[in-house]
Image (cartoon, rainbow, N blue to C red):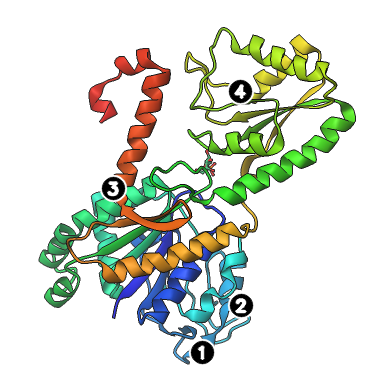
């Protein structure tokens, strides 16, 4: 019987809850036991400070009384109780034991009911510093082994997926060390000789190679489009110019797709840095030409990672000043910020993570010590499995190729050690 845990890591994205739901339900249907890990890798490192509590497939049974709690309880406390599922003999659930300090929680079918409509990630996420250290990963391995877990599903960006791969390749050595230092028994070491891992890409940035879409990107894009629709009406009313800064880190996908779907006048993306000496002129010329044919409003989209040909960041405030000073436009800046990341997932961010979650469980069930860890993606509308590290490496190569094309001088000066 496979004993599987699922965690979300890095920046949250809409659809992560759908991943957790799909993984838990698919795994139970296929006869596995399931856990969630709270707060990403940080939860694996922190583990469960207190003694054991028991859980069945129907829900979390916490306490000596073996009380059963259904999903509202679980959801309520994850949402409002800061991760504290039950209070010690007080409050709504007398007799319950606190789950404060418990990060690896056994879950059942009902615990994830309705999760696909929830934004963010209900099990929490973090950018764990401890997991980046070997000692942290050693403790994480010990905590997993103590819970009996032998398979892990990670949903996060490329950093999180790289962490997963490092963890798996180190696993045999971690187990040997844990046994030799008496932190696990010989029997546990034998039982947990191998770790199975699979990754799903959760990121609003759509910045991973070998998959057409990352989980959360369609919702974030939709959110940006809605915001632009709102801005459009007020911009039109006052005949104003708006400069919108959108997220995406070093990737311009959100900005580019938002501009296509909203008919923006001008955009800046990191992949195509404009000439530092000329972009102000060309932007003003383009926008003036739109105004000349009667356009009452102007929308300029700036991706947060946009730079010019001298690698100088392009700031929305600066663009606004150019529009005001050179074209005399009444201009404003709107930074959409985290409104892009939060909120209910759109339909596709429920469907895709559901299909991918099922595929993740299949990949784990079929995994052998010799198969690579897979990343579950989507290509040409088909759910795919690709070796995780190939996708991470391809992503790196694409960024290097873009940088070499745009900044040949800077790239030729780079420290080869650093670039590795
Ligand atoms: O990677 C997702 C993302 O939302 C990026 O678009 C953005 O640059 C970053 O995370 C913001 O991170 P934080 O939530 O830590 O401010």
* Residue 389: image tag: 3
Real-space Cα separation, disc 3 to disc 1, in angstroms? 43 Å
Q: Is residue 57 above or below residue 223?
A: below
How many neighbours does mark 4 have within 10 angstroms: few (below 14), some (14-19), or many (20 or more)? Answer: some
Ranked by sequence position, the earlier of labels 3 and 1 is 1
Locate residue 165, reporting x and y percent: 28, 52
Closer to the camera: disc 3 or disc 1?
3
Locate residue 59, reporting x and y percent: 49, 83
Image-based side of 286 in relation to 98, left or right: right
Q: Is residue 323 above or below residue 374?
A: above
| Residue ID for mark 2 | 72
Real-space Cα separation, disc 3 to disc 4, in angstroms? 34 Å
Q: Does the residue tagged 2 have its C-beta within 8 Å of any atom of ligand 1?
A: no
Ranked by sequence position, the earlier of labels 1 and 4 is 1
Quarter placement of the N terminus: bottom left
Ranked by sequence position, the earlier of labels 3 and 4 is 4
How many neighbours does mark 3 have within 10 angstroms: few (below 14), some (14-19), or many (20 or more)? Answer: some
Query: Residue at (37%, 33%) from the top-left corner?
Result: 398
| Residue ID for mark 4 | 315
């Amino acid at each position: 019987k496979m004993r599987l845990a699922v965690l979300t890591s890095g920046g949250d994205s809409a659809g992560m809850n759908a991943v957790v739901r799909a993984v838990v339900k698919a795994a139970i249907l296929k006869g596995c036991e399931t856990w969630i890990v709270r707060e990403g890798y940080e939860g694996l490192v922190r583990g469960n400070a207190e003694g054991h509590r028991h859980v069945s497939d129907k829900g979390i049974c916490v306490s000596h009384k073996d009380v059963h709690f259904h999903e509202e309880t679980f959801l309520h406390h994850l949402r409002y109780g800061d991760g504290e599922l039950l209070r010690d003999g007080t409050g709504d659930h007398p007799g319950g034991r606190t789950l404060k300090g418990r990060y690896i929680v056994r879950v059942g079918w009902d615990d994830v009911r309705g999760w696909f409509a929830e934004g963010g990630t209900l099990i929490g996420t973090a950018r764990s510093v401890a997991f980046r250290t070997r000692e942290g990963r050693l403790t994480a391995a010990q905590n997993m082994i103590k819970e009996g877990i032998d398979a892990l599903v990670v949903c996060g960006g490329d950093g999180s997926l790289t962490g997963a791969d490092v963890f798996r390749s180190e696993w045999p050595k971690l187990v040997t060390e844990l046994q030799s230092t008496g932190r696990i028994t010989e029997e546990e070491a034998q039982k947990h000789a191998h770790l199975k891992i699979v990754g799903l890409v959760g990121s609003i940035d759509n910045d991973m190679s070998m998959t057409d879409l990352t989980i959360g990107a369609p919702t974030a894009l939709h959110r940006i489009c809605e915001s632009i629709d709102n801005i459009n009406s007020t911009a039109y009313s006052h005949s104003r110019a708006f400069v919108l800064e959108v997220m995406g880190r070093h990737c311009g996908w959100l900005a580019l797709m938002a501009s296509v779907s909203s008919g923006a006048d001008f955009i800046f993306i990191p992949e195509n840095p404009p000439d530092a000496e000329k972009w102000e002129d060309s932007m003003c010329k383009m926008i003036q030409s739109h105004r000349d044919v009667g356009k009452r409003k102007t929308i300029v989209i700036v991706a947060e990672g946009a730079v010019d040909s001298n690698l100088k960041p392009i700031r929305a405030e600066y663009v606004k000043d150019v529009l005001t000073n050179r074209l005399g436009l009444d201009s404003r800046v709107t930074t959409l910020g985290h409104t892009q990341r939060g909120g209910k997932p759109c339909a596709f961010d429920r469907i895709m993570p559901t299909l991918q979650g099922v595929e993740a469980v299949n990949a784990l069930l079929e995994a052998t010590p010799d198969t690579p860890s897979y990343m579950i993606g989507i290509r040409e509308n088909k759910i795919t499995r690709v070796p995780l590290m190939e996708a991470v490496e391809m992503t790196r190569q694409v960024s290097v190729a873009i940088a070499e094309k745009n900044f040949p001088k800077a790239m030729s000066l780079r420290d080869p050690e650093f670039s590795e």
